[in-house]
Amino acid sequence: MQRPLQPAPQRPIYAIAHKVLTPDAVQMALSHGANAVRVDISPCPDRCKERQACSIEALWDLAREILEPAGVRVLYGFGQPTMTRGYTVIRDSLNENEAVVISGRTHDVLERYKAAGESIPIDRRVMDYGNLQFCQTLDLDPELRYAS
Protein backbone atom coordinates (compact mmCIF):
# COMPACT_ATOMS: atom_id res chain seq x y z
CA MET A 1 0.00 0.00 0.00
CA GLN A 2 1.37 3.42 -0.94
CA ARG A 3 1.60 6.11 1.66
CA PRO A 4 -0.42 9.25 0.96
CA LEU A 5 1.53 12.20 -0.34
CA GLN A 6 2.46 14.75 2.26
CA PRO A 7 1.40 18.33 1.56
CA ALA A 8 4.11 20.76 0.58
CA PRO A 9 5.23 23.15 3.31
CA GLN A 10 2.95 26.16 3.40
CA ARG A 11 4.37 29.53 2.44
CA PRO A 12 2.67 32.90 2.74
CA ILE A 13 1.02 34.34 -0.33
CA TYR A 14 0.65 38.09 -0.58
CA ALA A 15 -1.80 40.04 -2.70
CA ILE A 16 0.25 43.23 -3.02
CA ALA A 17 -1.60 46.35 -4.12
CA HIS A 18 0.60 48.53 -6.34
CA LYS A 19 0.64 52.33 -6.70
CA VAL A 20 -1.09 52.90 -3.38
CA LEU A 21 -0.31 56.59 -3.05
CA THR A 22 -3.17 58.07 -0.98
CA PRO A 23 -5.04 57.11 2.21
CA ASP A 24 -8.16 56.41 0.10
CA ALA A 25 -6.13 54.06 -2.09
CA VAL A 26 -5.08 52.08 1.00
CA GLN A 27 -8.73 51.56 1.96
CA MET A 28 -9.62 50.62 -1.62
CA ALA A 29 -6.75 48.12 -1.82
CA LEU A 30 -7.81 46.49 1.44
CA SER A 31 -11.43 46.30 0.28
CA HIS A 32 -10.23 44.49 -2.86
CA GLY A 33 -8.45 41.85 -0.77
CA ALA A 34 -4.88 43.13 -0.66
CA ASN A 35 -2.92 41.95 2.35
CA ALA A 36 0.12 44.09 1.52
CA VAL A 37 0.69 47.43 -0.19
CA ARG A 38 3.47 48.79 -2.35
CA VAL A 39 4.06 52.50 -2.04
CA ASP A 40 6.22 54.20 -4.66
CA ILE A 41 8.31 56.72 -2.74
CA SER A 42 10.62 58.13 -5.39
CA PRO A 43 10.58 57.43 -9.10
CA CYS A 44 14.32 57.88 -9.66
CA PRO A 45 16.35 57.64 -6.44
CA ASP A 46 19.51 56.95 -8.45
CA ARG A 47 19.40 60.56 -9.68
CA CYS A 48 19.81 61.87 -6.12
CA LYS A 49 23.11 62.26 -4.36
CA GLU A 50 23.84 60.04 -1.39
CA ARG A 51 21.98 61.18 1.76
CA GLN A 52 19.76 63.70 -0.09
CA ALA A 53 16.09 63.46 0.89
CA CYS A 54 15.27 61.65 -2.37
CA SER A 55 18.19 59.20 -2.30
CA ILE A 56 17.90 55.47 -1.80
CA GLU A 57 19.86 55.91 1.43
CA ALA A 58 17.29 58.40 2.74
CA LEU A 59 14.46 56.00 1.86
CA TRP A 60 16.35 53.19 3.55
CA ASP A 61 16.90 55.32 6.68
CA LEU A 62 13.19 56.22 6.88
CA ALA A 63 12.16 52.59 6.54
CA ARG A 64 14.55 51.49 9.28
CA GLU A 65 13.77 54.38 11.64
CA ILE A 66 9.98 54.52 11.26
CA LEU A 67 8.47 51.45 9.59
CA GLU A 68 10.55 48.55 10.82
CA PRO A 69 10.34 49.44 14.56
CA ALA A 70 6.54 49.46 14.12
CA GLY A 71 6.67 45.90 12.77
CA VAL A 72 6.31 46.80 9.10
CA ARG A 73 8.42 44.72 6.75
CA VAL A 74 9.86 46.48 3.72
CA LEU A 75 9.97 45.21 0.16
CA TYR A 76 12.30 47.11 -2.18
CA GLY A 77 11.29 46.79 -5.82
CA PHE A 78 13.47 46.97 -8.90
CA GLY A 79 12.70 46.66 -12.59
CA GLN A 80 15.18 46.16 -15.39
CA PRO A 81 18.11 46.55 -15.26
CA THR A 82 18.92 45.80 -11.64
CA MET A 83 22.51 46.99 -11.58
CA THR A 84 21.72 50.51 -10.41
CA ARG A 85 23.30 52.27 -7.46
CA GLY A 86 20.04 51.97 -5.53
CA TYR A 87 19.86 48.23 -6.15
CA THR A 88 23.47 47.77 -5.07
CA VAL A 89 22.95 49.76 -1.84
CA ILE A 90 19.87 47.73 -0.89
CA ARG A 91 21.27 44.37 -2.04
CA ASP A 92 24.39 44.80 0.06
CA SER A 93 22.63 45.93 3.24
CA LEU A 94 19.41 43.92 3.66
CA ASN A 95 18.33 43.07 7.17
CA GLU A 96 15.85 40.45 8.42
CA ASN A 97 12.86 42.80 7.92
CA GLU A 98 13.62 43.60 4.29
CA ALA A 99 13.31 41.81 0.96
CA VAL A 100 13.86 42.57 -2.72
CA VAL A 101 11.39 42.18 -5.57
CA ILE A 102 12.65 42.12 -9.14
CA SER A 103 10.09 42.59 -11.91
CA GLY A 104 10.26 40.71 -15.17
CA ARG A 105 9.98 37.36 -16.87
CA THR A 106 10.85 34.42 -14.66
CA HIS A 107 14.03 33.41 -16.48
CA ASP A 108 15.40 36.97 -16.38
CA VAL A 109 14.58 37.41 -12.70
CA LEU A 110 16.15 34.07 -11.75
CA GLU A 111 19.32 35.05 -13.64
CA ARG A 112 19.51 38.36 -11.77
CA TYR A 113 19.10 36.62 -8.42
CA LYS A 114 21.74 34.09 -9.43
CA ALA A 115 24.10 36.98 -10.22
CA ALA A 116 23.41 38.46 -6.77
CA GLY A 117 24.81 35.31 -5.18
CA GLU A 118 24.36 35.05 -1.43
CA SER A 119 23.98 38.81 -0.92
CA ILE A 120 20.20 38.37 -1.17
CA PRO A 121 19.13 35.37 0.93
CA ILE A 122 16.65 33.05 -0.79
CA ASP A 123 13.91 33.80 1.75
CA ARG A 124 14.15 37.51 0.86
CA ARG A 125 13.77 37.11 -2.92
CA VAL A 126 10.47 38.00 -4.56
CA MET A 127 9.57 38.25 -8.23
CA ASP A 128 6.66 39.83 -10.01
CA TYR A 129 5.42 40.04 -13.51
CA GLY A 130 3.49 43.15 -12.63
CA ASN A 131 2.16 44.72 -15.78
CA LEU A 132 -1.58 44.70 -16.34
CA GLN A 133 -1.19 44.16 -20.07
CA PHE A 134 0.23 40.71 -19.29
CA CYS A 135 -3.12 39.69 -17.76
CA GLN A 136 -4.59 39.85 -21.25
CA THR A 137 -2.12 37.42 -22.76
CA LEU A 138 -1.71 33.68 -22.49
CA ASP A 139 1.88 33.76 -21.25
CA LEU A 140 1.18 34.78 -17.64
CA ASP A 141 0.19 31.33 -16.39
CA PRO A 142 3.38 29.57 -17.59
CA GLU A 143 5.47 32.36 -16.01
CA LEU A 144 3.74 31.88 -12.66
CA ARG A 145 4.21 28.11 -12.79
CA TYR A 146 7.88 28.47 -13.73
CA ALA A 147 8.44 30.95 -10.89
CA SER A 148 6.95 28.64 -8.28
Image (tube, rainbow, N blue to C red):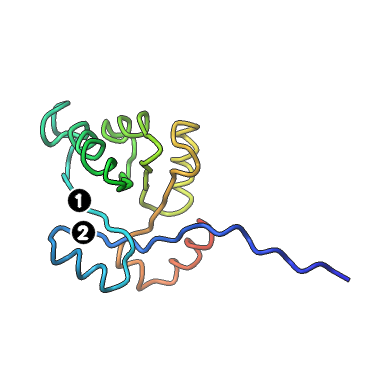
Tell me the residue at 65%/64% (across/down): 7
Name the side, left or right, on which 71 lies relative to 141: left
Tell me the residue at 48%/42% (across/down): 111
Task: Establish if 138 lies above or below 92.
Answer: below
**Mark 1: which amino acid?**
Asp
Q: Are marks 1 and 2 in contact (CB under 8 Å)?
A: yes
What percent of the width, then of the height, locates residue 47? 15, 34
What percent of the width, then of the height, locates residue 129? 38, 58
Task: Establish if 77 lies above or below 46.
Answer: below
Q: Residues within 10 Å of mark 2 (few under 14, many from 20)?
A: some
**Mark 2: which amino acid?**
Lys
Q: Farthest residue in the right direction?
A: 1
Q: Quadrant of the N terminus?
A: bottom right
Give the secondary structure at mark 1.
Answer: loop
Return the residue at label 1: 40
Tell me the residue at 21%/41% (across/down): 66
Return the residue at label 2: 19
Q: CA distance from mark 1 to mark 2?
A: 6 Å
Tell me the residue at 17%/26% (across/down): 50
Q: Residues within 10 Å of mark 1 (few under 14, many from 20)?
A: few
Q: Is residue 43 visible?
A: yes
Name the side, left or right, on which 49 lies relative to 137: left
Give the secondary structure at mark 2.
Answer: loop
Nearest the viewer among 133 and 58 is 58
Picture disc at residue 125: none
Q: Is residue 79 visible?
A: no
Image quadrant where residue 87 sits = top left
Give whichever of discs 1 and 2 has the lower sequence position.
Answer: 2
The number of numbered discs placed on residues in the rendered structure image is 2
Q: Farthest residue in the front direction?
A: 70
What percent of the width, then of the height, locates residue 18? 26, 60
